[in-house]
Image: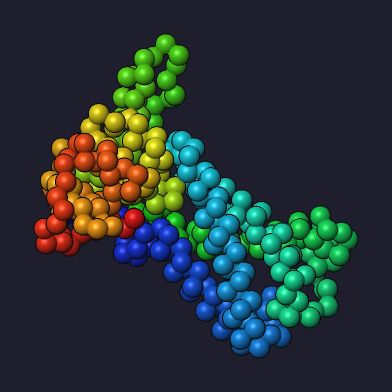
Amino acid sequence: MRVIDRTILSIAPIRTSLLGVCGFLTVLFTLVEPEASQGLGLAARLGFWVLHIGIALGAILLVSVVIRHCHLSRWPLWILVLVTGVLGAVISAPLYLAIEVLLPELIPIDTPDSFWDRYAMQGPWQAVVSEFFQVLPLVLVGWVTVNLPLMLNKPTLLEPPLPPEPPTSEQTEQDAMQARRDAFFASLPEVVGQDLIAISSDLHYLNVYTTLGKAMILGSLKYYAEAFAEEGLQIHRSHWIAKAHVERLCLSGKDAFCLMSTGLRVPVSRSNRKLAKTYFGSLATPKKAPAIKIAS
């Protein structure tokens, strides 16, 4: 199976990549001791960066969850990354100021000597603006690093056409759904084909599994699950499967998954078990567990 996952180092999904980058930056800044944490001991410095980078991580994840419901396939990737990073910094800035008030022992004592330090002393809103511009580079660097493989890796054999314009009121719903399917396939690298196995969401990205491989694209699972409603079924808030490639539904205690024709195991949520049984039946004891599994 050819794999084109476009994730960091081609081995980890976006969420795992984000955690990895944040962990690396935490260790790096703790050891390098940049100006923001100068004067702190090792333990306090580590706590300082764990807290600050953790807040940035949480803010980016929150923004990603919110904007994943937009029609992201129409957005240029660099704009999406930039908007997500900026909004993450907007959320992070007031939280960083709250830390300075609640945990002053984690903030090194320093004489205001820069423009932003002096500007922050003029009032609360100025302090938030100052904090935003100081944390923005850190948030953007981390977020761009996570998305860099996807931004650089373009394995398509031919340049795909632009997504179609939104359907007009004169178009039927069937035409609208066909337009979504066309846009979806236009986003896929040609080398993975169009014989879908499963689609899984990963923040504002989609991991698309076909009989020839795997690729990652921008998009909302709900948006495309509606378009492929006849060909498949959404069995989990994060997973859609193609009916034609389901070999069996396996139920064992709390575990439930669909075994696909390629050996892929796709989790079934508790709320969708009844629906899955209606389509695929069930077996109480699954066969020997296949090697490939999609995390819930």
Residue 162 to residue 265: above or below: above
98 vs 73, left or right, is right
**Which of the 4 quarters of the picture holds residue 167?**
top left
Q: Nearer the viewer, residue 268 or 13?
A: 268
Q: Position of residue 22 (x, y in %)?
A: 50, 69
Q: Nearer the viewer, residue 203 or 112?
A: 203
195 vs 117, left or right, is left
Q: Please name the residue shown 31% across and 42% down the image.
A: 272
**Which quadrant of the rendered structure holds the C terminus?**
bottom left
Instruction: Describe the colour scheme in one phrase.
Output: rainbow
Numbered circles on residues, count: 0
- Outermost residue on the top side: it is 170
- Outermost residue on the bottom side: it is 41
Q: Please name the residue shown 61% across and 51% down the image.
A: 87
**Which quadrant of the rendered structure holds the N terminus?**
bottom left
Residue 253 to residue 193: above or below: below
Is residue 211 at least partly visible in the picture?
A: no
Q: Nearer the viewer, residue 12 or 54?
A: 54
Q: Position of residue 197 (x, y in %)?
A: 21, 44
**Which of the 4 quarters of the picture holds residue 36?**
bottom right
Residue 245 to residue 140: above or below: above
Q: Please name the residue shown 40% across and 34% down the image.
A: 223
240 vs 33, left or right, is left
Q: Nearer the viewer, residue 118 or 17?
A: 17
Q: Please name the residue shown 73% across and 80% down the image.
A: 105
Q: Position of residue 254 (x, y in %)?
A: 28, 57
- Outermost residue on the right side: it is 122
**Which of the 4 quarters of the picture holds residue 147?**
bottom left
Is residue 77 at least partly visible in the picture?
A: yes
